[in-house]
Amino acid sequence: MTGSSDNRHVLLVHAHPDDESINNGATMAKYVAEGIGVTLVTCTAGEMGEILVPELEHLAHDQDDALADQRKIELTEAMAALGVTDHRWLGGFGTYRDSGMKWHEDGHAVAADDVHENAFWHADLTEAADHLVAVIREVRPQVLVTYDQFGNYGHPDHIQAHRVATYAAALAAVPSYRTDLGEAHDIAKHYWVAMSESWMREGLRRLRDAGDTTTFEGMDPDGHLPPFVTSDENLGCVVDGTAYNDQKMAALAAHRTQITTDGPFFALSNNVGSEAWGYEFYRIAKGTKAAPFNEQGLETDLFNGL
């Protein structure tokens, strides 16, 4: 949707199809239901993603290299599940290709050895940002959601999405910059997606106590956690989207080449309950933390104070 009855609007910038449903599916569904404008911009079609459906393995980048069209279908289905009607591909579908990644020995993602010449990782920052400036000035959001400077876990496309979103937001606010892209607009609050450390440890503890040792295998509820997990002291907001958890699960299931219904997202939801993925956490990157707060001192809405 491109507008709302109360003029509130949130813009989300994600790297690949499925990132939006994992990180913000419940938030998006909640805001759509409340009549708030929701715009999703996806930077690549996820051409380098793994394929978990055997009969579709031929779509892989090293075979038919046709995964983009399948993931486009999956994202369309996921947005239908969440009720989101305004989705854009950065610069248009196919402008930027998934850069791929590999795992570093320290447990975070890094750029692959061979990166396609059209990969998002190689995108000219100003050119990519200008595509987003036009969107910002069109929909005029009060809230921007994207990743932190590390892309939450090091994936080059997540890092690039952070850079593009941050730079575009700055450029969009300059009255004299690219007036052909629309009237200047300053986004009041910026948030980075996050995963609560205490929430993750408690979820893992419940799984292990229930005898589940395979979901998030290798992660110890009392041990070291991966970089996408955020210390609670750095959190700024939590959105309670538990009423929309079924929609989030449906959106995740739509991304069938990437997410299986017996995988960790569904296992945690089945074992822990609807709160497993219905609470979505955020760090404040720009703007002032504002009431109302919950018992942990976190904002309860991305629009608090606006």
Image (cartoon, rainbow, N blue to C red):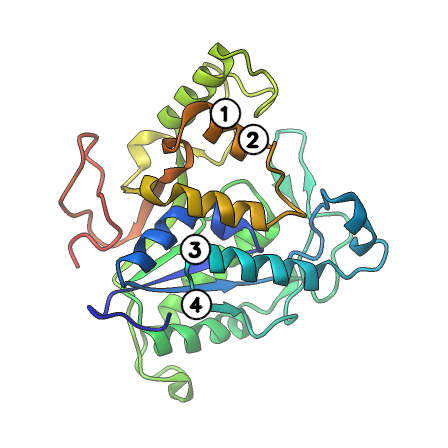
Q: Is residue 298 above or below residue 97?
A: above
Residue identified by numbered label 1: 225
> Is the residue marked by circle 4 packed among few (<14), some (14-19), or many (20+) residues within 10 Å?
some
Residue identified by numbered label 2: 264
Residue plotted at (47% across, 55% down)? 81
Q: Is residue 87 left or right of residue 66?
A: left
Mark 1 vs mark 2: give the one in front.
Answer: 2
> Which numbered dot is residue 104?
none
Residue 284: give x, y in percent of width and height. Answer: 30, 47
Residue 239: give x, y in percent of width and height. Answer: 29, 44
- Label 1 is placed on what type of residue? Leu
Q: Earlier in the sequence, mark 2 or mark 3?
A: 3
> Is the residue marked by circle 2 packed among few (<14), some (14-19), or many (20+) residues within 10 Å?
some
Residue plotted at (17% across, 59% down)? 306
Q: CA distance from mark 1 to mark 4?
A: 35 Å
Residue 195: give x, y in percent of width and height. Answer: 41, 36
Residue identified by numbered label 4: 85
Q: Is residue 251 above or below residue 267?
A: below
| Of the pair 9 and 161, the residue shown nearer to us | 9
* Secondary structure type for disc 2: helix
Q: CA distance from mark 2 to mark 4?
A: 28 Å
- Label 3 is placed on what type of residue? Leu
Residue plotted at (17% across, 30% down)? 295
- Label 4 is placed on what type of residue? Thr
Q: Is residue 301 left or right of residue 100?
A: left
* Secondary structure type for disc 1: loop
* Secondary structure type for disc 4: loop
- Label 2 is placed on what type of residue? Pro
| Of the pair 40 and 58, the residue shown nearer to us | 58
Residue identified by numbered label 3: 82
